[in-house]
Amino acid sequence: IWRQLDNSLAQLRKAEKDLAELRGKQMTRHVCAQQVEAIQNEFVHAVHGVVVLQWCVGIMDSEPAELKAMAELAKPISAASAWLQLLSNRLGMPKEVWQRVIDYTLPTQISTAGNERKPK
């Protein structure tokens, strides 16, 4: 679901950008009604895609809520990560193997979250 949410949010951002560009064009010149309708439909479809994915993770908002959705997705991923770490400790896996498992198993956003710390 994490990748689906990323893709849906990217589509939403693109649709917002296209709609904003179209609104700018409309202020300076005539724009074909079909073009306006197509871009508005794309925007509505993108919003719907994000909202449906939010419903899948338990967020019943009717508007896109990116931060809430990512926070809800992070909960089961954190639990899975803790379970994997426990498993690693019990099996005595070397650090290199553990890092490869984490990189393969968890979404990039989670597995790289700790790497942004500034060195002292």
Image (cartoon, helix red, strand yellow):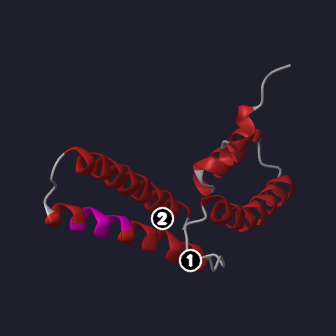
* Quarter holding residue 95: top right
Query: Residue 62 in the image: x percent, y percent?
Result: 56, 77
* Quarter holding residue 16: bottom left
| Looking at the image, residue 118 lies above or below residue 103 | above
Residue tagged 2:
4
Q: Nearer the viewer, residue 82 or 61?
A: 61
Task: State which region is magenta.
Answer: 37-43
- Which disc is residue 62 wearing? 1
At label 1, counting other C-alpha atoms closer than 10 Å, the crowd grade (few under 14, some 14-19, many 20 or more) is few
Query: Residue 23 in the image: x percent, y percent?
Result: 31, 52
Residue flagged by tag 2: what amino acid is it?
Answer: Gln
- Residue drawn at point x = 63 percent, y = 45 percent: 100
- Residue drawn at point x = 72 percent, y = 68 percent: 76
Q: Is residue 61 magenta?
A: no
Q: Is residue 41 magenta?
A: yes
Q: Nearer the viewer, residue 90 or 82?
A: 82
| Looking at the image, residue 105 lies above or below residue 100 | below
| Looking at the image, residue 51 lies above or below residue 71 | below
| Residue that sits furthest to the top in the current view | 120
- Residue drawn at point x = 16 percent, y = 65 percent: 33
Q: Quadrant of the N terminus?
A: bottom right
- Residue drawn at point x = 58 percent, y = 79 percent: 56
| C-alpha separation, residue under disc 1 versus residue under disc 2 | 18 Å
